[in-house]
Amino acid sequence: MTASASRTAARRRAVELVFEALQRDVDLMSVVRTRTALREAAAETDLEPDTELPDAVVVPPYTLQLVQGVGAHQPEISEWLDTYSQGWPQSRMPAVDRAILYVGAYEVVFEDDVPDPVILKAAADLASKLSTDKSANFVSGVLGRLSKIKATLR
């Protein structure tokens, strides 16, 4: 798997974990710990994790980095989304769009090793695969605004 493909998979996994935490209104790291514990339990039994324990996941290092970052900055990311989504409060956004935006906002503002255009494209691709027809443009627009002003957000 190429570095790009593994980052794409890691982002998607991060979005799934953030989505679950937001939907269940629980701490992001508790979701990661639960999934990891299930995977470890499956390894100690005859259960097949991918079929018999679908919630048991391997959490790649970049996924963990993204989820920890979102968790550490969740209040400020939430404020940015409320401020820069131009008339779209989070309560009106599809839940998956919110999860993509949380991961993308963290990555744009705090992760300097990936160029912003790559992050924006990856987020838009996820939105087009996982959400509504208009979500890719919306996600790209919000993250694009954050990218332009990220120096003022740190």
Image (cartoon, helix red, strand yellow):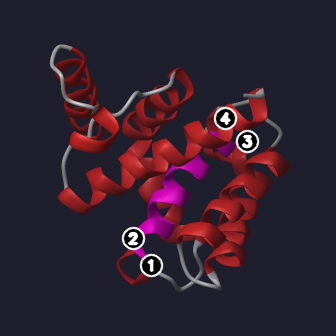
Which residue is outermost to the top?
44
Circles 3 and 4: CB atoms closer than 8 Å: no
Q: Specify the amino acid type for callout 1.
A: Met
Classed neighbour count for the residue bearing mark 4: other residues with Cα under 10 Å, few (<14), some (14–19), many (≥20): some
Mark 3 or 1: the one toward you: 1
CB-based contact (under 8 Å), mark 2 and mark 1: yes
The first of marks 3 and 2 along the sequence is 2
- Mark 3 = which residue? 151
Q: What residue does disc 4 label?
A: 7
Query: Which comes sooner in the sequence, label 4 or label 2?
Result: 4
Query: Where residue 72 appears, x then y in whole percent?
Result: 39, 33
Q: Is residue 4 visible?
A: yes
| First in residue order: circle 3 vs circle 1 | 1
Q: Amino acid at mark 4?
A: Arg
Q: CA distance from mark 3 to mark 2?
A: 27 Å
Give the class, few, some or many, for how many residues have Cα within 10 Å of label 3's Cα (few <14, many ≥20).
few
Question: SS class of the residue under badge 4?
Answer: helix
**Mark 3 vs mark 1, CA separation in Å:** 26 Å
Instruction: Give the Cα separation between the discs numbered 3 and 4.
Output: 24 Å
Mark 1 — residue?
93
Q: Is residue 54 shown to the viewer in this render?
A: no
Q: Which mark is residue 95?
A: 2
Disc 2 crowd rating (10 Å Cα; few below 14, some 14-19, many 20+) is: some
Q: Does dot 1 land on a helix, a strand or a loop?
A: loop
